[in-house]
Amino acid sequence: MAVALDDALRYSGGLWFGWSGRTSDDESVSEVGVDGYRLATMALSRARFQGYYEGFANGALWLLFHGRADIGRFEAGNWRCYREVNALFATSLSPLLRDDDTVWVQDYHLIPLAR
């Protein structure tokens, strides 16, 4: 998926926004130009990463979507963190968008972001 999106953005331009893959207390957006498009990423604090990514997205949703709800960890704190991180992403992405942008939200990690 990432290779196809990279090729499409190189051809048409645009913005790719997402988690940087790093944990840090500095959760500000970093933006760079990459071969014809913009790449904006942000780190998450270790606590947010654990609740959002490890806790809810992978510890509950992934298992639920793959028929393994029996081993999922459905914890209220992780659910709150998942919603909080999606709200943080939305708030951080919003100023980077233009009025005529089309936004494609990819993956179960970002279901609330689509709203």
Image: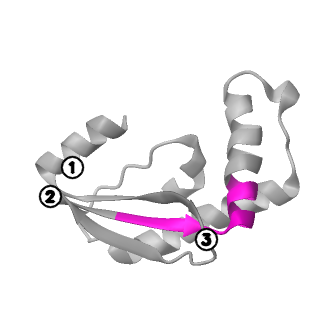
Q: Amino acid at mark 3?
A: Ser
Q: Residues within 10 Å of mark 3 (few under 14, many from 20)?
A: some
Dot 1 lies on which element? helix
The image quarter in which residue 51 lies: bottom right
Alpha-carbon span between mark 3 and mark 2 = 28 Å
Residue 51 is a magenta residue = yes
Task: Report if residue 115 is visible in the image.
Answer: no
Q: Earlier in the sequence, mark 1 or mark 3?
A: 1
Q: Which residue is mark 2?
A: 36
Q: Earlier in the sequence, mark 1 or mark 2?
A: 1
Q: Nearer the viewer, residue 42 or 96?
A: 42
Residue for point 14% across, 58% down: 36
Residue visible at 16% across and 56% down in the picture: 35
Residue 39, image x, y percentages: 31, 62
One can see residue 106 in this view: yes
Of residues 76 and 1, the one drawn nearer to the viewer in this rendering: 1
What span is colored magenta in the figure?
40-52
Q: Amino acid at mark 1?
A: Leu
Please provide percent x and percent y for residue 26. 57, 78
Residue placed at 73% from the left, 30% from the top?
Answer: 63
Which mark is drawn over residue 9? 1
Question: Which numbered disc, 3 or 2, marks the residue closer to the eye?
Answer: 3
The residue carrying mark 3 is: 24
| Helix, strand or loop at mark 2 | loop
Quadrant where the N terminus is found in the figure: top left
At x 33%, y 71%, the residue is 31
Count numbered badges in the picture: 3
Marks 1 & 3, CB-CB < 8 Å contact: no
